C-alpha cells in the first residue's frame, strides 16, 4: 500500500493539525495490513474501519493515504464475507476517486470494478450488472475492445447477467465480440470463441432444465 511519505511530511508540518500524529496513522495502517496478512482478516477489517475517521481529519478525504485505507477496508471486509461493509467502502472510494482523479483514471476504474463485484456479492446482482456495464463501456473506450482488462470485465458482467437469469444476454455479448473478430487470429479471438461456446452450452442447459421443470409441474389430467 502506498503510504504517501511526502504527504505525511506535509501533513505533519501543516498548521492547526487536528487528530493523531500523521506518522502514527501510517504505522497503524501498516500494522492493520500485517494483521490481515498474518491470518486475522476480521481484526484487519476492524482496524481499518476504526482509523478511517482519523485519516479523514488528518490527511483529508481525498489524500492518497486515506484512499488507501478505504480500499484496504473494502478488501479485508470482502475477505471475511462482510460484503455490506465492503460494498459501502468501495462505493465511498469510487465516489472520492471520481472527485479527485476523474472517472477515466485507472485507479477510479479499479475502484469501480471492485465496487461492482462487492455489490453483487452483497446480494444485488442487478446493480452489479449496471456497474459492470458502466465499467465495460469505459474500458472499451480507453483500452480497446480486445484488451485483457476489457475481456475480464466482459466475463464478470456475463457471470452476473447469468445470476439474474440473463444467460442468453451473456451469450450475445461474446457472439458480438466473436463476430467482430472474424478473420483476426490471436488470443482475443480465441477467448471470444471459447467464451461463446461456453455460454451457448450454458443457455442450452438452462433451457432443458426449464422445460423439465415445466413438465414436472404440469397437472396430470385423467
Image: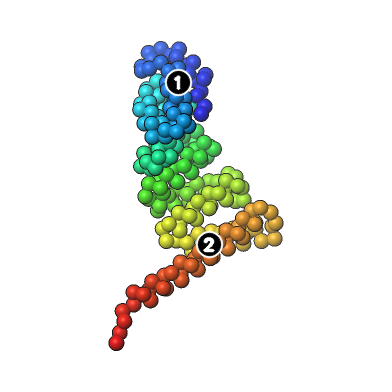
**Neighbour class for label 2 at 10 Å: few (<14), some, many (≥20)?**
many
Residue carrying label 2: 199
Position above or below: 163 against 104? below
Quadrant assignment, res 191: bottom right
Quadrant assignment, res 69: top left
Please give the label number shown on residue 88. none
Disc 1 element: helix
Position above or below: 30 against 161? above
Question: Residue drawn 49% across and 38% down?
Answer: 108
Position above or below: 215 against 119? below
Task: Residue 71 in the image: state x and y as whole percent.
Answer: 45, 34
Dot 2 or dot 1: first in sequence order is: 1
Residue 73 showing in the rendered view: no
Disc 2 element: helix
Residue 104 showing in the rendered view: yes
Position above or below: 123 against 100? below
Question: Which of 132/140 is in front?
Answer: 132
Label 2, label 1: how far apart the Cα atoms are: 48 Å
Residue carrying label 1: 27
Question: Residue drawn 38% across and 71% down?
Answer: 213
Question: Which of 22/214 is in front?
Answer: 214
**Neighbour class for label 1 at 10 Å: few (<14), some, many (≥20)?**
few
Tell me the quarter of the image containing the C terminus. bottom left
Question: Residue drawn 46% across and 30% down?
Answer: 38
Lateral position of residue 186 relative to residue 43, left or right: right
Question: Residue drawn 42% across and 33% down?
Answer: 40
Lateral position of residue 29 relative to residue 172, left or right: left
Task: Residue 39 in the image: state x and y as whole percent.
Answer: 45, 33
Quadrant assignment, res 42: top left
Residue extending furthest toward the left: 222
Disc 2 versus disc 1: nearer the observer = 1
Amino acid at each position: 500500500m502506498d503510504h504517501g511519505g511526502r504527504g505525511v511530511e506535509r501533513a505533519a508540518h501543516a498548521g492547526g493539525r487536528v487528530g493523531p500524529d500523521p506518522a502514527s496513522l501510517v504505522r497503524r495502517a501498516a500494522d492493520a495490513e500485517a494483521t490481515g496478512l498474518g491470518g486475522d482478516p476480521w481484526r484487519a477489517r476492524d482496524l481499518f474501519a476504526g482509523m478511517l475517521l482519523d485519516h479523514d481529519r488528518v490527511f483529508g478525504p481525498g489524500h492518497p493515504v486515506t484512499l488507501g485505507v478505504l480500499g484496504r477496508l473494502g478488501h479485508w471486509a470482502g475477505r471475511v464475507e462482510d460484503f455490506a461493509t465492503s460494498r459501502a467502502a468501495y462505493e465511498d472510494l469510487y465516489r472520492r476517486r471520481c472527485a479527485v482523479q476523474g472517472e477515466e483514471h485507472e485507479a477510479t476504474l479499479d475502484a469501480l470494478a471492485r465496487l461492482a463485484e462487492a455489490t453483487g456479492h452483497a446480494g444485488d446482482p442487478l446493480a452489479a450488472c449496471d456497474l459492470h456495464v458502466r465499467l465495460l463501456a469505459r474500458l472499451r473506450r480507453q483500452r480497446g475492445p480486445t484488451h485483457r482488462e476489457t475481456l475480464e470485465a466482459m466475463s464478470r458482467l456475463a457471470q452476473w447477467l447469468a445470476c439474474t437469469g440473463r444467460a442468453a444476454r451473456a451469450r450475445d455479448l461474446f457472439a458480438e465480440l466473436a463476430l467482430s473478430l472474424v478473420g483476426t487470429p490471436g488470443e482475443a479471438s480465441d477467448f471470444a470463441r471459447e467464451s461463446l461456446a461456453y455460454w451457448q452450452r450454458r443457455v442450452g442447459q438452462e433451457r432443458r432444465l426449464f422445460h423439465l421443470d415445466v413438465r414436472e409441474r404440469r397437472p396430470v389430467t385423467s
